[in-house]
Image: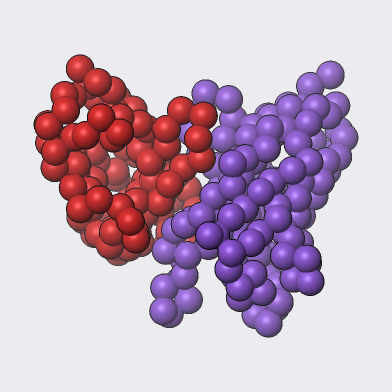
Amino acid sequence: EVQLVESGGGLENPGGSLRLSCAASGFTFNNAWMSWARQAPGKGLEWVGRIKTKTEGGTVEYAAPVKGRFSISRDDSKNMVYLQMNSLKTEDTAVYYCTTYRLSVTKHFDGLDTWGQGTMVTVSS
Amino acid sequence: DIQMTQSPSSVSASVGDRVTITCQASQGIITRLAWYQQKPGKAPKLLIYAASSLQNGVPSRFSGSGSGTHFTLTISSLQPEDFATYYCQQTNIFPLNFGQGTRLEIK
């Protein structure tokens, strides 16, 4: 069974840092592109960023609101993906989801096909 | 950035009804669109990708159509478990924006 389990959420002050972790199982992790998405309380979904496989360069892309502050990385030896969040702002308060990235046969993004249960991040003084 | 606009924002319907939700892209995205279902307190679930392809395990009462800028998600005969919030997402270019969501409620 494909499973993603996030951890590392909590309460942090504005300007602080948090690192979220996502443990993956049930699929060949080193072949998977991975992504993070978030959802502020009572709001809609927002894509945060994605990371390609190591063999494809491990390239990352980010949404504008987090670019330069957030960083996605992966450790294929541990089947883990991480979201390092620096310079946190109150508007970063959200549930953060780790997801797999469904690709077409031509390696185009088709959708976020497996989601973790999410981890809550609250940024407040 | 491509903006995604869903309509309606909310809809009330009864079990057995046919419901259609619309998603409009601010510029053409060919068929690069996904639909998700989210129930309260749960993670979203991918229903449809590439505008009309059903994800594995999704009931056939769900269908998607459209291309360019106009897309629809149709539920042919509503079941009790279908009452949820639905989101579209353009999968064409970064940033991969979602629509604002459509809440489907029981009448």
Look at the picture and state if A76 lies above or below B73.
below
Q: In the image, A14: left or right of A74?
A: right
Q: Please tell me in which quadrant of the rendered image residue B50 appears.
A: bottom left
Q: In the image, A26: left or right of A14?
A: left
- Res. B49 in view: yes
Seen at 71% across and 77% down, the residue is A54
Q: Position of residue A29 (x, y in %)?
A: 64, 69
Q: Position of residue B10 (x, y in %)?
A: 29, 25
Look at the picture and state if A58 lies above or below B94.
below
Chain coloured purple in the rendered structure: A
Instruction: Compare residues B9 and B55 and report the one nearer the observer.
Output: B55
Seen at 75% across and 50% down, the residue is A21
Chain coloured red in the rendered structure: B
Q: Please tell me in which quadrant of the rendered image residue B21 appears.
A: top left
Look at the picture and state if A119 lies above or below A79.
above
Seen at 86% across and 40% down, the residue is A17
Point out the residue furthest to the front here: A1
Q: Position of residue A62 (x, y in %)?
A: 65, 55
- Res. A69 in view: no
Q: Quadrant of the C terminus of chain A?
A: top right
Seen at 79% across and 22% down, the residue is A124
